[in-house]
């Protein structure tokens, strides 16, 4: 999973079109949704709960 989270900044910086993100604006907007997607990943897999129990 960590490799998938590094790709949006790379795609924005290098102006790479992928997954329908064919403009700089679309790539930039996607950057703001990455933290939401990461949180959803952690929650849906149970990792968020496991991390909280360890602390």
Image (cartoon, rainbow, N blue to C red):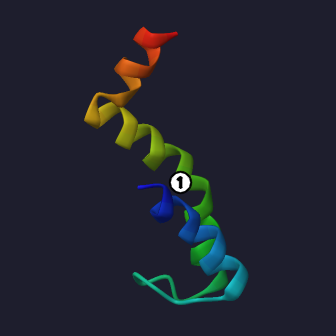
Q: Where does residue 49 sit, x and y in percent of width and height?
A: 36, 19
Q: Where does residue 24 sit, x and y in percent of width and height?
A: 66, 83
> Going by the image, does 48 lie left or right of 30?
left
Q: Can residue 41 be seen in this view?
A: yes
Q: Is residue 25 visible?
A: no
The residue shown at (52%, 89%) is 17
Question: Mark 1 = which residue?
Answer: 33
Quarter-of-image position of residue 12: bottom right
Front-most of 46 and 17? Answer: 46
Quarter-of-image position of residue 47: top left
Residue 30 vertical placement versus 42 (above, below)? below
Residue lying at the far left of the rendered structure: 45
Q: Where does residue 33 sit, x and y in percent of width and height?
A: 53, 54
The residue shown at (42%, 84%) is 20
> Going by the image, does 10 lie left or right of 45?
right
The residue shown at (45%, 12%) is 54
How dense is the environment of label 1, judged by Cα within 10 Å: few (below 14), some, or many (20 and up)? few
The residue shown at (66%, 88%) is 15
Residue 9 vertical placement versus 37 (above, below)? below
Mark 1 secondary-structure assignment = helix
Q: Where does residue 2 sit, x and y in percent of width and height?
A: 49, 55
Front-most of 49 and 22? Answer: 49
> Going by the image, does 17 lie left or right of 47?
right
The quarter of the image holding the N terminus is: bottom left
Residue 54 vertical placement versus 17 (above, below)? above
Residue 23 vertical placement versus 35 (above, below)? below
Report the number of numbered marks.
1
> Going by the image, does 34 lie left or right of 14?
left
Residue lying at the far right of the rendered structure: 13
Residue lying at the far front of the rendered structure: 54
């Amino acid at each position: 999973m960590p490799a998938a989270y590094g790709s949006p900044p790379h795609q924005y910086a290098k102006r790479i079109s992928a997954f329908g993100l064919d403009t700089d604006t679309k790539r930039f907007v996607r950057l703001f949704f990455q933290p939401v997607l990461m949180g959803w990943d952690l929650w849906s897999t149970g990792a968020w709960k496991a991390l909280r129990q360890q602390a």
